Each structure stands twice: as C-alpha cells, then as structure tokens.
Image (cartoon, grey):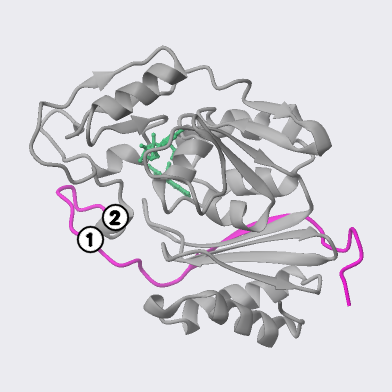
Amino acid sequence: MSLPPGSARSWSRVRFWPRKPPRCKTGSGTIMPEPDVLCAPPATAAGPAPQWLSPTSIAEAVQMRADHAGSQFAAGMTALQLGWPEAPHGSRPETTVIDISRLDMGPAVMQQPGGWLRIAANAPLEQVRRDPLTARFDALRGLIDAIAATGVRGLATLGGNLCWGTGDAAVFCAAFETRLITAQGPVTREALPPDALLLAVDIRPAPGFIEKVGFRAAFSPARALLVGCEGNGHLRLAARLQGLPVAVATVTCAPSPSDIAAVADALCVGAAPDSEDAAILRALCAGQLGARVA
Ligand SMILES: Cc1cc2nc3c(=O)[nH]c(=O)nc-3n(C[C@H](O)[C@H](O)[C@H](O)COP(=O)(O)OP(=O)(O)OC[C@H]3O[C@@H](n4cnc5c(N)ncnc54)[C@H](O)[C@@H]3O)c2cc1C
C-alpha cells in the first residue's frame, strides 16, 4: 500500500509538557539545558588570547578557521553565547570567534531547478519565514514559527541551528529531502564535518507537519519534536526526544494531528532517555498509527 499524493495535509503545532525540564545551575538562576546541549567551546590547549575576526570573503573565513585552532564560526550568536562564561559586563567568548554574519552567501531564499529552495546559511530565520518564496511551504514556516520568539529569530540562522547540534532544523532536515552546501562542497546532514563552513541548505518543498512538545521555561530544549514529510507514496517521520539523536521511520499512512499527538506523547512518557533510537520510533508508529513501518 502506498500513500496517495496529497493525502497528507500541512500543519504545525506547539504544545507544552506539564513537567519541568532538568535543572542546571547557572549564576543567574535561570533554567538552562544540560551543559552538553550548550555551545561549549571546543577543548584546546591554552593558546593565544581569543580574537574577534571579521572575514570579508568565504575563502578568508575558511582560512581563518584553519589558522586559529579551536576557533568558532558565529552567525546570529543566539546559541553560541549561551556557552560563554558570564562576566561583570556581559558574557564573553573564550575562543577566537569568526563572524560570518555579513558574508555574502546569496539571497536569503532562492528558487532552484526541480522546485527546490536554497536558503542562505547566514540569513536570519525571520527573513526566511517572511520571504515570498517560502509562502507555500507551510511546514518550513511552521518549523521557523516554533523556534524561539521573533526577536531571537531576527538574529538566529538556519546554518547556526543545524551546526549547533541540537537545533530543531536537524529533525526537519532528516524528514525532508535536503542537501547541505558547504565551502568544501555538498554533504549530507550526517556527514557534515565539525569544522565545515555551511553556506546554504537546499530543501525540496513538500506537504508535511511539525509537532513540538516544549517545556514552559525561559530556555530549554524541546521535550519532543516530530516532523513528517509526504513523498514518493510514503510519509517520512523524523523525531527527537530532548537533545538525543534524531530517529527516522517511514510509514505508509497519512496520520491525523491527533495520531501524531499520540506518538509524541508516547515518546515523551515511554522512551527511556538513554535508549531512544529508530527502533523505538518505529515501534511507536506501528503501535499508535497501525501503519506499515519500513
Ligand atoms: C531564548 C532562546 C530560545 C531558543 N529557542 C530555540 C528553539 O525553540 N529551537 C531551536 O532549535 N533553537 C532555539 N534556540 C537556539 C538558537 O537560537 C537557534 O538554534 C539558532 O537557529 C542558532 O542560530 P545562530 O545563527 O544564532 O547560531 P550561532 O549561535 O551563531 O552558532 C551556533 C553554532 O553553529 C555554528 N555555526 C553557525 N553558523 C555556521 C555556519 N554557517 N557554518 C558552520 N558553523 C556555523 C557556530 O560555530 C556554533 O557552533 C534558542 C535560543 C535562545 C536564546
């Protein structure tokens, strides 16, 4: 059995999980994700004092990254600054930062052959969300809508979200057909080298949905995120439970929003955080959706 084209509607929903996120002490007492979720600077031997570098070309940025061991690219800095130590006059980076926010990575959104969209890695998410080219890509707009608030999205980028490691876009890219374009060439999401400079993300628009279950806290990783994409007669479902690796399952059914809510709830309550994997997601899909699972 295969899924008839157009049987999946596009929708997105954010719900809140009644329990509190795991606490992690900070100087200001705010609720923060566990330290490994933060953008901790790469471990390096003590070296020269950190610098703030502003390359004017892609090639220069790549060269700077190679020349400065332990340096980090910075786009919107909304995730990066979470890992900077607090200081009396604001937090400061401990490593050399290479500011890529003003580099020319092309238009925020560009039409590509075959209906694909190319999104510049350093374009602010809010600009991508408002671009006329994404107007009919409800799932992408739903994803961006569910990331932080407008003020943060005015700085935050898709590149930063993907390279951060626990951003929501990784789940989206696992469900939808995507190609990552780096300064060194195209790569898959799984094969993105840690020191690569991401220039753009190509996404093939399709009907799909976003189901995000978050905590009501100032900043905490989502409890669960499920993203579905319809294509080639099946539904590709990607899920992540609170910062754990992304699991993917392929199902031959068009689940309703309440079916997906049941899968998300089962993920939230049932799966032991250290045993989350694709097998659990497949079992949940088979049980909750009654669907054939590949
Ligand atoms: C209040 C608040 C709420 C948030 N809510 C959410 C949320 O709901 N969902 C979510 O996913 N995130 C959330 N975030 C985290 C963050 O805002 C987003 O993930 C954002 O998209 C990161 O993008 P950035 O440009 O700010 O990345 P940065 O902070 O600049 O960088 C993040 C990481 O990516 C690397 N990097 C950045 N750009 C590139 C590139 N082009 N090539 C290679 N490496 C690169 C940096 O070196 C760094 O390691 C939130 C943050 C805050 C402060």
Q: Position of residue 210 (x, y in %)?
A: 65, 57
Q: Secondary structure at mark 2?
A: loop
Residue that numbered label 1 is attached to:
24
Residue 155 painted magenta: no
Q: Is residue 196 visible?
A: yes
Q: Position of residue 159 (x, y in %)?
A: 49, 37
Q: Which mark is residue 57?
A: none
Mark 1 neighbour density, 10 Å: few (under 14) some (14–19) many (20 or more): few
Give the quadrant of ligand 1. Answer: top left
Location of residue 201 by image quarter: top right
Q: Which residue does the image show at 74% across and 46% down from the upper left?
A: 138
Residues at badges 2 and 1 in contact (C-beta under 8 Å)? Answer: yes
Q: Is mark 2 within 8 Å of ligand 1?
A: no
Q: Main secondary structure of the magenta part?
A: loop
The answer for how far apart the CA atoms under marks 2 and 1 are is 6 Å
- Please state which of residues 196 and 95 is positioned toward the viewer in this rendering: 196
Mark 2 neighbour density, 10 Å: few (under 14) some (14–19) many (20 or more): many
Q: Which residue does the image show at 50% across and 75% down from the upper left?
A: 277
- Residue range corresponding to the magenta coloring: 1-30
Q: Is residue 102 visible?
A: no
Tell me how many marks there are: 2
Q: Is residue 246 left or right of residue 63?
A: right
Q: Amino acid at mark 1?
A: Cys
Q: Amino acid at mark 2?
A: Met
Mark before the other along the chain sequence, 2 or 1: 1
Residue that numbered label 2 is attached to:
32
Q: Which residue does the image show at 69% across and 50% down from the upper left?
A: 177
- Please state which of residues 136 and 115 is positioned toward the viewer in this rendering: 115
Q: Position of residue 119 (x, y in %)?
A: 62, 32
